[in-house]
Image: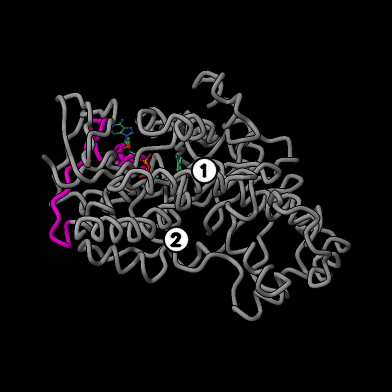
Amino acid sequence: MEQVVIIGSGISGLSTAFRLRKEGVKPVIFEKEEEIGGNIKTVKEGSYILELGPQTVLADSEVREFMRDAGLEPLEAKPESKNRYIYRDGRLIPLPMNPLSFLTSPLISFGAKLRVLREPWAPPPFKSEETIGDFVRRRLGEEFLTYIVGPFVSGVYAGDPDQLSVKYATRKIYQLEREHGSLIKGAIKKKAIGPGGKLVSFKEGLFTLVRNLAKDIEVKLQNVVLRIRRKDDRFILDTREGKVECRCLVVSSPAYTASYLLKDLSWSASLEFDKIDYVPVVVLHLSVPEGTVPEGFGFLVPRNQNIRILGVIFSSKLFESRAPEGKDLLTVYMGGATDREILNLSDEEIGETALRELKNILKTDNLEILKITRWKRAIPQYTLGYGKYLELAREMEKDHPGLFLTGNYLGGVSVADCIRHSKEVSERVIRFLEG
Ligand SMILES: Cc1cc2nc3c(=O)[nH]c(=O)nc-3n(C[C@H](O)[C@H](O)[C@H](O)COP(=O)(O)OP(=O)(O)OC[C@H]3O[C@@H](n4cnc5c(N)ncnc54)[C@H](O)[C@@H]3O)c2cc1C
């Protein structure tokens, strides 16, 4: 019998396994794919380093410490990557980074700026739980939502601000209102409004992190788990290589997989988890001659611009050696909650659309597509009422001592969130093992 089995070798499963290993526990991971890493996929295409999934980690001191524990020194994005752009009415407008540039920026109208200044006097919420859209309209106004918050919601969740819950998807912003009564007042007191930390990766890309985490861990690749049953104080797993028993089980697969895995333990939780919405994302990697794009992180496109591209990251501007001499590497995102139909297009049609739109935005014909990657179920959406899923997960764990759930549908969607969540999960596993 195994002591601890972990299902899934994405960043959630691997971080949990790594932390347990450090405490002397020897977990075994079952992974259905032929490679570890889940969404984290770095591939080399000639002299280009392509991130097919996440590009960067927004690392605070805790996450950086974790990376160092894994024997890695994170590579910070170049300072110029602080510059971000929003595409509006045919041009890339720098995102204002301080109050003065905000007041002089052409990104939103004078009226919209006055509206933002009235934020401290915004009315209290009308409903017990609001969408990000309603929250921002109430506090900052429609234009701020369209040109600033909306694009960021696309950037993080590929999501729709009118679907996502402010309480669960942007918890820090929700807390600012609750603690300070105003975002502006709260931001001044805390000296920041966004999530803290620095954007990092590694010289050879993010796969370096998962490779290092897995170094000392037994991972059974191409070994899908099909079913979980409970027998006395043990879990019995049907895996590709037969039955496996364990006392302690960590399920770190996406919600739609956890749903079928957990159905023998709780039929109702299984039905609910299956309802968690994962939106599709298509990622295109393109090469352009150096000098085509400005220095910076990239740009986002508000949904009212009649453009299917959600945003573009200037990948080779963030980190050295992502593209050969004389070239820049761009990563383009399409799809998301507001354009699920993207999956109905062929690669050729997606490529043509991206090229046509980029030609207009960047004013160049010199664009070469390197790769197109489809994520049919990319990112879970923390929609209105999401608390019920978190509650169900807690109940399942309570009803089945020895069962632990983790993954980006529970503790936050970013890689950094998954790493932070693994700390809490691994501590609970240790407490369980110690009886
Ligand atoms: C296109 C894209 C871009 C992103 N960009 C960023 C970014 O720039 N920065 C950022 O912080 N985050 C980003 N994210 C989000 C982040 O990458 C993910 O939230 C995170 O990697 C999820 O990790 P996870 O371990 O929870 O899940 P996953 O990575 O999905 O891992 C789950 C693992 O479980 C395995 N599994 C599933 N079912 C079974 C089974 N039955 N048996 C065995 N194994 C199973 C899967 O094969 C997989 O390996 C992005 C995501 C996508 C898709």
* Callout 1 secondary element: helix
In the picture provided, is 432 more to the left or to the right than 194?
Answer: left
In this picture the colour scheme is one colour
Q: Residue at x 66, y 52 (%)?
A: 86
Q: Earlier in the sequence, mark 1 or mark 2?
A: 2
Residue 30 in the image: state x and y as whole percent: 22, 36
In the picture provided, is 137 more to the left or to the right than 86?
Answer: right
* Residue 102 in sight from this viewpoint: yes
Disc on res. 389: 1
Residue type at mark 1 is Tyr
Q: Give the answer, above or below, for where 337 lies relative to 391.
A: above
Residue type at mark 2 is Leu
Residue 267: which quarter of the image? top left
Residue at which label 2 appears: 58
Disc on res. 202: none
Question: Ligand 1 quadrant?
Answer: top left
Q: Quadrant of the N terminus?
A: top left
Q: Classify mark 2 as within 8 Å of ligand 1 or not, answering yes or no.
A: yes
The magenta-colored residue range is 21-46
